[in-house]
Image (tube, grey):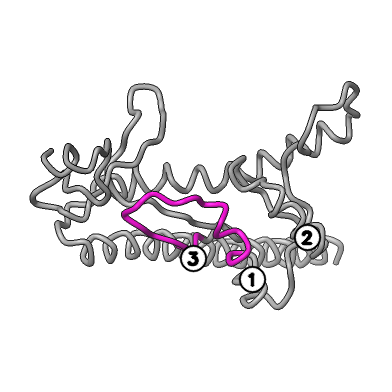
């Protein structure tokens, strides 16, 4: 308080709000009932139902600044740029839109400026499909909080908390991989069972004819 009075300032950067966790910073979100939140801020991406942790920070940051790096990571992983990206409103800046246009990437969401008066059915359907795809990443946050304890990180140190968060996403991806393996195994088993049933039925028909 004395420092603020002497320097005629109304804020203190990196002020301590928790004695046990001095790395915690207040993050203004503006949500109803929770205008300020405390904890780590994450920037993640979702590809083929797998979640990738792109950016983790205890300080507030603008997620749109990570957009290009995330797309480049996707290109390094797959070898090509995506045909479309489905992002939140904060990512749809002029700079990111111009960069996507240069790379031939379609970005979801309405264009900037005044909305057009007449919107075709194809455009409406495309917007609905884009929102359905984007809901996957929102669902992953809910899944992590409900099933994997992402909203209840009990570690005190920043390093151990970051490790717990990263392990949470690792377990989520392993669970997704396990479900895919189980589905593949069941599909192969059911197909082989169906094939055996058809073969047995054919044998019965041959015997009846004979």
C-alpha separation, residue under disc 1 versus residue under disc 2: 13 Å
Q: Earlier in the sequence, mark 1 or mark 2?
A: 1
Q: Are marks 3 and 2 in contact (CB under 8 Å)?
A: no
Q: Which mark is residue 54?
A: none
Give the class, few, some or many, for how many residues have Cα within 10 Å of label 1's Cα (few <14, many ≥20). Answer: some
> In 3D space, how far apart are the residues under numbered discs 3 and 2 (Cα atoms)?
24 Å
Position of the C terminus, as image quadrant, is bottom right
Label 2 sits on a secondary structure element that is loop
Q: Which residue is mark 3?
A: 177
Residue at x 55%, y 62% (from the top left corner): 186
Rendering coords of residue 43 (x, y %): 47, 55
Q: In terms of sequence position, does the residue under pointer 1 or pointer 3 come before the other?
A: 1
Q: Who is closer to the viewer here, 61 or 195? A: 61
**Image-based side of 184 in relation to 58, left or right:** right
Badge 2: few (under 14), some or many (20 or more) residues near its Cα, within 10 Å? few
Q: Quadrant of residue 100?
A: bottom right
Residue drawn at (27%, 36%) of the image: 10
Q: Position of residue 166 (x, y in %)?
A: 35, 64
Q: Which mark is residue 83?
A: 2
Secondary element at image label 3:
helix
Q: Quadrant of residue 32?
A: top left
Residue at the (76%, 37%) spot, across then down: 112
């Amino acid at each position: 308080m004395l420092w603020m009075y002497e320097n005629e300032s109304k804020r203190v950067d990196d002020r301590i709000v928790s004695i046990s966790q001095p790395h915690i910073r207040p993050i203004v979100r503006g949500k109803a009932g929770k205008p300020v939140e405390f904890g780590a801020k994450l920037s993640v991406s979702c590809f083929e139902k797998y979640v990738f942790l792109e950016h983790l920070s205890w300080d507030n940051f603008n997620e749109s600044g990570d957009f290009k790096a995330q797309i480049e990571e996707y290109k390094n992983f797959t070898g090509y740029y995506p045909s479309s990206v489905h992002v939140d409103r904060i990512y749809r800046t002029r700079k990111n839109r111009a960069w996507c246009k240069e790379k031939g990437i379609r970005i979801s969401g309405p264009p900037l400026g005044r909305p057009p008066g007449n919107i075709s059915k194809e455009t409406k359907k495309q917007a609905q499909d884009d929102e359905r795809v984007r809901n996957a990443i929102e669902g992953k946050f809910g899944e992590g909080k409900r099933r994997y304890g992402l909203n209840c990180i009990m570690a005190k140190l920043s390093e151990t908390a970051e490790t717990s968060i990263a392990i949470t996403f690792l377990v989520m991806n392993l669970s997704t991989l396990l479900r895919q393996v189980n589905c593949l195994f069941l599909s192969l088993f059911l197909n082989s069972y169906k094939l055996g049933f058809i073969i047995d039925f054919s044998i019965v028909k041959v015997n009846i004819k004979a």
